[in-house]
Image: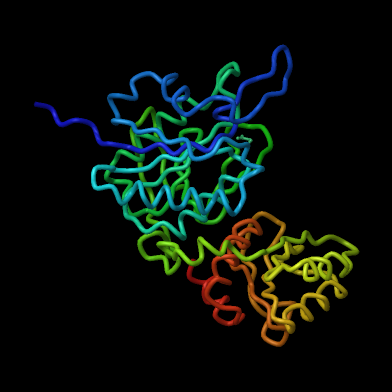
Amino acid sequence: MPKPPPRIRILATGGTIAGAQTLGGRGYKAAAFSADALVAAVPRLDTLARLEVEQVAALASQDMDDATWLRLAARTQAAVASPGVAGVVVTHGTDTMEETAFFLNLVVRTRKPVVLVGAMRPATAISADGPMNLYNAIAVAADPAARARGVLVVANDEIHFAREVAKTNTTQVGTFRATHRGLAGLVNSGRLHLYGPPVRRHTHASVFAPLPRAVAARGLPRVDILHAHAGMGRDLIDAAVRAGARGLVIAGVGDGNLAAPALAACAEAARAGVAVVRSSRTGGGVVERNIEVDDDALGLVAADELNPAKARVLLQLGLTRTRDPRRLQQLFFAY
Ligand code: SIN
């Protein structure tokens, strides 16, 4: 008797992969199709895996929020805890996929593959990219070689590490890039070619995983991102602090720099106990400590390699454990 294919749980959240075009128009509505409909549209999936489908949310990923992250993390943790489940596939919009992938990479304790997948073209488009992306994602989740690599993102025949991947183009199917440490691998019609392994702590070695019940019940602390620019003032930083932000991520110019009035506001916020992380709006490179900004003196944290969106995720989780900028900095060097 041939061995039955592995069991894979699909957790659906919506996105363009489940999107339908509006009649006669160029527009479309994300999250229009159910996960069952997506799966039914892909031929030969039954040769790869026995699928269990669960609809966790049905939204366009610009509407992804902390509450949905916490629910998705709990459902992912429950899926990997099931002894018969070999891996998990999360269908998701591409807009915030890198944040959700990094969040799950930090809070789900597992060695099993957890793979996020989306599409740039809606399911009804000419040459929709969703079906092949979904086929490949299921192939990755079903392959034991993909274990213990942290959360992965599959799109356009590429496999990406959650920590490294970023959406870099508004419309093209090859939107996902990993500017620092490169691809996790390739997947061609379900056949894997894996590179790696990932360099930083994740999933089974993450201090945040599994997410404690108390954190899930309380919710994540508020962290705001502020985009630096020529002539930046302090008003929006002060407003964020007044609105209750417990952390700020600055998408700084260059090496995480910001204009003098804005820097003064950040230093004041840090003195008042708000965690301030300097990242970069450039899309690449490392934000180093104490280059043009005296982080030691001002009590600031450097984002290291994380882009602003991912720095926000790590800071939200870091703040569930400490407000000390030195301990927060160690997290940015470890994850
Ligand atoms: C979304 O992120 O939900 C919309 C865009 C996409 O999925 O490509």
Residue 42: x %, y % from top left: 42, 21
Q: Is residue 173 above or below residue 144?
A: above
Q: What colouring style does the render use?
A: rainbow
Up/down of 100 relative to 59, above or below: below
As drawn, which residue projects farthest toward the top? 24
Residue 81 percent across, percent down from the top left: 31, 51
Q: Residue furthest left?
A: 1
- Which quadrant of the structure image shows residue 282? bottom right
Q: Residue at x 52, y 56 (%)?
A: 103
> Residue at (33%, 37%) from the top-left corner?
8
Q: Quadrant of ligand 1?
A: top right
Q: Position of residue 262 (x, y in %)?
A: 84, 71
- The residue lying at 35 percent from left, 46 percent from top is 79
> Which residue is nearer to you in this view: 95 or 305?
95
Q: Tell me: 268 left or right of 273.
A: right
Q: Nearer the viewer, residue 6 or 75?
A: 75
Q: Residue 143 is drawn in which quadrant?
A: top left
Residue at figure coordinates x 34%, y 24% from the top left: 45
Which quadrant of the rendered structure holds the N terminus?
Answer: top left
Q: Position of residue 144 (x, y in %)?
A: 27, 45
